[in-house]
Amino acid sequence: MHASDVVLAGLGAVAAVAGVTAAACAAGASRLKPSAPAGAPVDADGYRADDAAVERFRELIRIPTVSREDASLRDDEPFRQWVPTLRRLYPRTFGACELTTIDDFGILLRWPGADPAADPIVMMAHQDVVPVEGQDWEHDPFGAEVVDGQIWGRGTLDTKCIVGAFFEAAEHLIGQGYVPPRDVWYFSSDGEEVAALTCAHAVDWFREHDIHPYLVLDEGGAVAADAPLGVAEPVAMVGVSEKGHVDLTVTARADGGHASTPAANDACRLLARVCERISANPGKPVLTPAVEATLSELGARSGALYKAVFGNLWLTRPLVTKIMADVPETGAMIRTTYALTQMEGSTAHNVLPPVARANFNVRVAPFETIDDAVARARALAAQECEASGLTPDHVTVEVNEAIPYTEPAPVSPFAHDAAFDYIHRCVAGVYPEVGFAPYVQNSCTDSREFNAICERVYRFCGFVYSGEARTLLHAPNERIGVDVYKRGIEFYVAFLGHLADL
């Protein structure tokens, strides 16, 4: 059975339970309405992207700005081409803006506003892309070929589309004589995909210059077609937080020896039991206000069953939480998760190793901390040692310091907040047919660094991403529709062109 079918069946049971108070549930369902912006929708004032914009975007895709985990293996020449190419393609923007380089190739661009004393906004993207080696592409990943109305290439979705759209919008607005009411900063990292420190250093630069952004907009959510819960229309999903991340090394120790005389507590067997105990007992599921808002928006745009369930969380919350927790896709929305990704034992097929190790990739929910996640894993490891008649020192759980880790991001304001509503108004103006909802992002972005100096950090890419498109991130055959790209530019024109309404 598909995950969505499991959720549907479970929620059907919830609705049946809710039937004991049918009148109250009907009232709750009737109050569940699709969200609407508090102010008038904001559009692109008649702007429409042309084919020349697409050709400029294709030039960006053809520059193979591939980042590498091992920086010594990275080819820096494409990164050297990046800013000169942007200057050539968008001369008005670079004529009006001030460029600062962060580290080797990070970009910090200031578009001066009418009131430099006003807190600025920061627009974010990253020019680096993940490698393509070992992937089977139907078309050259750096050829930017247009096939069947789609632009093929690494970075078309992640996130050179944002880069191109920002510069197209700025170039158009500057050409119209527009001056933003407050400073607009554009930041782009050359190492987001490898968790480089470029963004952290950009934030340090802001601190040194006493700059406090009012709003930050980075990649993350998008206008999601193929929304869950039977929702027919697309829904703009705006990330208001993101889960933390840490990798844990679990190490089991035993005597080792010849494989002809195995024992119950050999290192590999003990490690396997400990790992299963940790995997089977992740964090407690919690429906946070952000998740409830997500479910309310989706439920309001779905059928009667979901309206009854999500319109009456006062009654259905325990069962909804349990059902969501039992499905991987929805469980990740409401709890800390422990993904067992690597295991290491003996180097020989007939030797019992004295040490066996495993790696857990842990995504920490916004209502917990890395310390909470580590303490839970250690307690579970100790429980397994006790159940096996061993002292706790037979198994250790340690943070893998070699892999970057980060705490969950604070939740940015989304209920009755002017900045969040401004994003909603821009979405409503460019995509009047779509819904709008906050959500908590499972993956990590550079924007988390800006939480240290900005209260309002949002994760939203102003393009329509189909269900298929979302599977192509970091995968072979990444591509974006020509019309999807053009329409996405309109969002950035609307967003940047109406900042006086913010």
Image: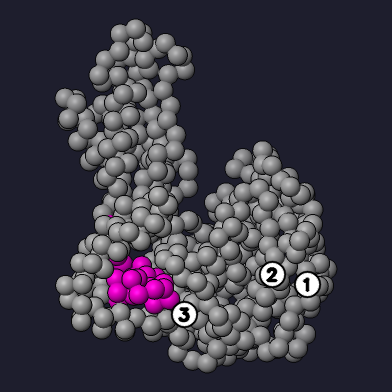
Residue 407 in view: no
Tell me where residue 247 appears, x and y as whole percent: 41, 43
Residue type for callout 3: Phe
Tell me where residue 343 appears, x and y as whole percent: 42, 30
Figure quadrant of residue 469: bottom right
Tell me where residue 440 appears, x and y as whole percent: 41, 64
Q: Closer to the camera: disc 3 or disc 2?
A: 2
> 53 above or below 326?
below
Question: Is disc 2 placed on a helix, strand or loop?
Answer: helix
Q: Which mark is residue 489?
A: none
Q: What residue would you read off at disc 2?
A: 485
User: Which mark is first along the chain, 1 or 2?
Assistant: 1
Q: What residue would you read off at disc 3?
A: 420
Q: What residue would you read off at disc 1?
A: 53
The Cα atoms of the two marked residues, 2 and 1, are separated by 9 Å
Tell me where residue 132 appears, x and y as whole percent: 68, 44
Q: Closer to the camera: disc 3 or disc 1?
A: 1
User: Which mark is first along the chain, 1 or 3?
Assistant: 1
Give yes or no for contact between labels 2 and 1 (Cβ–Cβ under 8 Å). Answer: yes
The Cα atoms of the two marked residues, 3 and 1, are separated by 28 Å
Give yes or no for contact between labels 3 and 2 (Cβ–Cβ under 8 Å). Answer: no
> 91 above or below 61?
below
Residue type for callout 1: Ala
Question: Is disc 3 placed on a helix, strand or loop?
Answer: helix
Q: Which residues are magenta?
A: 285-311
